[in-house]
Image (cartoon, coloured by chain):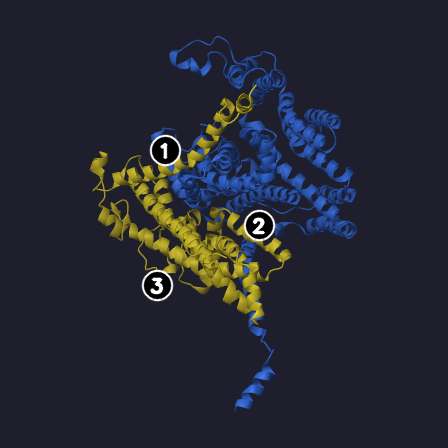
Chain colours: A yellow, B blue
Amino acid sequence: MSMDELKTDITRQTENSPRELLTRTFFFLCAALSIVTTISIVVLLVTEAAKFFTLTAPLMGVTGQTASIVDFLTGTTWEINSGEFGVLTLVSATVMITLGSAVIALPLGVATAIYLSEYASTRARSVLKPALEILAGVPTVVYGFFALIYITPALSVIFPSIGTFNMLSASIVVGIMIIPMVASISEDAMSAVPDDLRQAGYGMGATKFDVATGVVVPAALSGIFSSFILALSRAIGETMAVTIAAGSRAQFLNPLNPASFLEGSLPMTAAMVQLLLGDITGGGLAYRSLFAIGLVLFVITLIMNVISDFVAQRYREEY
Amino acid sequence: MATNTETGEIEDFGQVSRTVGTVFRYLLLAATMFGIVMLAILLLYVANDAIRPLTADLGWHLTFFVGLVLPTLLVGWTVYRRDRAALSFGALLVGTLVVSLMFSGGVALLAIDVIPPLVAFAYAVGLVVPTAATVGLTRYAHRISFTTRLIATTMVFYLALFGLPGPIGDPVGAPSLVPSLVEFVLTRPVIPVDRVMVATVIGGISAAAVGSYVAGVRDWTIGLYAAIAAFLASTAAGYVGPFVGLNPVPAVVVTAVAFVPTVAYAWRGAFTEGGSPLGLAFAATVVGGALVGAVAVDALGFAGPQSWVDWQFLTSSHSGTAENAGLYPAIGGSILLMSTVAALSFPLGVGAAVYLEEYAPDNALTRFVDVNISNLAGVPSVVYGLLGLGVFVTYLGRSAGTVLVGGATLALLILPIVIISSREAIRSVPTDLRQASYGMGATRWQTVKNVVLPESFPGILTGTILALGRAIGETAPLIMIGAPNVVFDLPATLGSKVSAMPLQVYAWSSLFASEDFYTKAVPAGVVVLLAVLLAMNSIAIVLRNKFERAG
């Protein structure tokens, strides 16, 4: 038997035997499922949303009621019964939730990350990190109930004019919910800063405070920003807490006016839940508007995720 | 001037103000604690509303303080002074008992109201027989090629589960020639009683698990004895149960799912090498104290707290009045949904992770899948709900709000999380092990099956349980796929309408919004939901700690 024959005999059973092919195909199909999911989401949202707009509906072969795409994107009234679909109303509410939760979560999250990565002892960290994870693990419907039942009455002591449903309490719980996200991603970025930089700082006579704020935070800035964007994208997509706490009456509010936080409105996600709970007939205008909002939501969160990825990659300090 | 400045500098040299640093440090600590303290306060409020400890008699509190809290503290302190490991073992043992009791409640619910014992028994027979045939085929027939073996295995399973010609014959209306094994068992005129069938199925699974656990600690003969003892205990429970006021079927389930594993764990921790019997004393104090307290309170006639989380709440369905409302159909729905989600997302997620870590070539497609998965993890859950609504309900024509549609939607939702955590677990398997396997001439699949998956299994399991914890709290996707707000019965099949715990809580806090529901039913629902989540997460954390210590 020549060496070559021996080799083929030994390697005969590998790589392309039926068993290997079968298992490899199975594993590949599992991985391919994620692409199928993405494609289905995009195709579904785009086709259904296209049936919603007057401009594109004829292309999809839909007759009957449609809505103008310009009115949809620029209108400031959301009333399904009278056929007014101004998504800006919903977007303004979502922007308010996002701003409000950012005010709470971003500073607290970064401070938490600095504490965990620079100050906390190993023992403290092993207690604090799981405790923070709990914040993200509590179901959002529970947060919504907390906001409605406990936080709003507490706030009404300070702001007597606050409504039963208000943006402030919803923003607070969404902010608490996303603190762990900001903290854990920022902390990862800070822990990745090499010790040499810190030692160099101490060698120059810097205090721990100087090193934390002057060396570690600037070096981890790209990670911190990417955590901000991811957390805010989470706040935008957050559904149950805002559905329960923020109310159900859509009204256009000025996000930059602090007084409007005391009123209730209808963020995009809450509007979708409300549409579903109402009487919507399959294929009707309200049903299709659901997908139009979904598309806006999907596009916004996708863009934010991509930006976060880009910032983390592009501006990462390589050591 | 110059000299003055110089002397001034020299006097200050080495003097650094520590005020700023200290203030900063405590500010950071305060910021870290803010969220945790806020949540703790909210949880205290909701627990107080739901359990209402202040409505109990003073005597009730005193009895439990003297019977349970004081001895626990005393024994705990003593054990801690002698042997810290023993205390943590004792605490884990109590935790195991509590969590497994909760779990057995869920299994009992399935055994009583969802899957009739006869059906479970028939399917168990229909699965065990072909599995045994397959194992025999693999073990004694090496000469048969893989393809033949695969075809034979498939046929055996098909015959056992569907008969001949089975579903293949349906489109042409072929009459059933050979009934399946399942049907055969189902149509026997003489069938064993329920408690025996439940003991065979659930007690059998539990006995096999305990047996292999014990065998892993000692050797297989002792493992076999343990398995037999466990099985006998479960069977006996069906006959002893009625004497202590338990129905036979729940008695069997609780014994098989809660007591038997707890006893096995206690044996392992206390009586094997390096064990700590002291921990057993601690666990006995806690459990004994609780029992003594309960008996004493009953005998002395002290009224307990008028908690809204009571047996009535856990076993009845929705009602128009908050006092009579219950969570039973929602608990059952959540259990069924989670089973479906686990059955779908575990194999698919692990499969994708194995492909990406072990098989995937480094090309553009792989990188695209990679980016795609991390983006899918960031897609809002309502959008997944829309996906379920649009694809499963509208296009595939499944009826809205069923277990299958809900489970599939939630499975898609957590799939990216399962994939990401499984990949991490697989990546942490040392490359040396893989190389050693390849060096022995193993193929890629053999390496995956014998080395990579067993090594990474605890990590994969931890990630999957955490992901399931995320799925169990999700409400929005279920609303989107049209799950009903009010369900009065447990879903009987995968195609029936389902509610879930968070959905029921949402329904009570929005659709039935009233002061009554806000202060009674909703807090109780929240407490039950959080208790289930806590149990799941603690399993995951214990697994993770064990895994990290071993690794």
Q: Residue furthest front?
A: A2
Residue B440 at x, y percent in the picture: 61, 30
Judged from the image, the secondary structure of the residue bearing numbered disc 2 is: helix
Q: Give the vertical position of B548 relative to A172 (above or below).
A: above
Q: Chain of mark 3?
A: A
The residue at the far bottom in this view is: B1
Which amino acid type corresponds to the residue marked 1 in the rendered image?
A: Val
Q: Amino acid at mark 2?
A: Ala
Residue A227 lies, with reference to residue B502, above or below; the image says below
Please state if B272 lies on the left or on the right of A19 as rendered.
right
Q: Is residue B463 left or right of residue A228?
A: right
Above or below: residue B478 compared with residue B51: above
Label 1 resides on the chain identified as: B
**Foreground: B208 or B523?**
B208
Q: Which residue is mark 3?
A: A257
Asked if labels 1 and 2 share a chain, the reply is: yes
User: For residue B118, which quarter of the picture?
Assistant: top right
**Would residue B342 be seen by someone viewing this image from the given angle?**
yes
Residue that label 1 marks: B391
Pointer 2: what residue? Answer: B47
1 vs 2, front mark: 1
Q: Which is nearer the eye, B451 or A154?
A: B451
Q: Residue at x 60, y 39 (%)?
A: B432
Q: How far apart are the two marked residues, 1 and 2, measured between alpha carbons?
A: 40 Å
Quadrant in which the C terminus of chain B appears: top right
Q: Quadrant of residue A49?
A: top left
Label 2, residues with CA under 10 Å away: few <14, some 14-19, many ≥20: some
Q: From the viewer's perspective, tell me whether residue B285 is left or right of residue A67.
A: right
Q: Chain of mark 2?
A: B
- Identify the residue shown where x is 70% and y is 41%: B93
